[in-house]
Each structure stands twice: as structure tokens, then as C-alpha cells.
Image: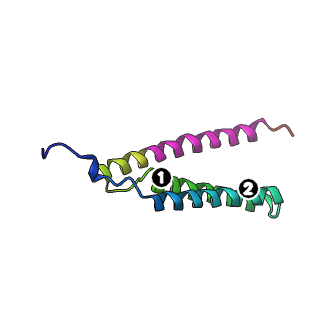
Amino acid sequence: MSGHASHEEHSHGSVKSYVVGLILSLVLTIIPFGIVMTGALGTSATVIIIVATAVAQLLVQLILFMHMNTKADEGWNFMSFVFTVSILVLVIGGSLWIMHHLHLNMMIG
């Protein structure tokens, strides 16, 4: 049947990709945990490292575990991901902006 999509078209990953993803996830979790627990860096450097490792871990999870790429489902996976990220950026960015301005306007003194 040419009109039906088969499940064999999509790769579900290999044991090697899952092991690599697990090791990367563990390393990307241990790095910020160690920095926070030792207090080796200043506050701004710690926050930057936490954000960077969080973004890297997000990419590891999406690529190695959820198999997000531009080829699956004719790009619809990727398009839905881009839409989701844009909505999240708008909601989180807008919330932080509102809280920042509320903090500035509510400060006494």
C-alpha cells in the first residue's frame, strides 16, 4: 500500500545512542551540581553555567532520546518543535519582563 506510512521509515535509535545520551545527561547534570555545591565560582558565572548546561541537556534529550530531526514526518516534527519553543520563549520572557518591572516599580526607597 503506497498511501500508508510504515513504522520502519523512522529510526528509533540504537543502544549506543541511548548510552551516549545517558552519559551526556549525567555529565551535564553533575557539572552544575558540583559548581553549586562547591561554590567555586561567583553568582553570575554559576548562573551562566547552569543555563548553558540546561540548554545542552535539552538538546541531548531532544536529539538522542526523542529523535527530533528535520527529516521525520516531512519536517512536521521540527516545525512543531520550533512553534513550541517560540511560544515558550514568549511566555517565559514575558513573565520575566513583567516580574522585573513589577519589582522595579514596587521597590520602596
Amino acid type indicated by mark 2: Phe
Left or right: 48 as drawn, with respect to 60: right
Q: Nearer the viewer, residue 12 or 46?
A: 12
Amino acid type indicated by mark 1: Phe
Q: Residue 49: horizontal and vertical position, in percent? A: 68, 61
Left or right: 86 as drawn, with respect to 23: left
Q: Which residue is mark 2?
A: 33
Q: Which residue is mark 1?
A: 65
Is most of the magenta stretch helix, strand or loop?
helix
Query: In percent of the image, x 42 and y 47: which residue is there?
Result: 81
The quadrant in which residue 46 appears is bottom right
| Looking at the image, residue 91 lies above or below residue 43 | above
> What are the residue bounds of the magenta stretch?
84-106
The quadrant in which residue 30 appears is bottom right
Q: Residue 77: horizontal and vertical position, in percent? A: 36, 48
Q: Is 90 colored magenta in this rendering?
A: yes
Query: In percent of the image, x 54 and y 53: which residue is there?
Result: 58
Spatial CA span between label 1 and label 2 = 22 Å
Q: Nearer the viewer, residue 100 or 22?
A: 22
Of labels 1 and 2, earlier in sequence is 2
Q: Is 16 colored magenta in this rendering?
A: no
Q: Residue 28: horizontal and vertical position, in percent? A: 63, 59
| In the image, farthest residue toward the left | 1
Left or right: 59 as drawn, with respect to 11: right
Q: Nearer the viewer, residue 98 or 62?
A: 62
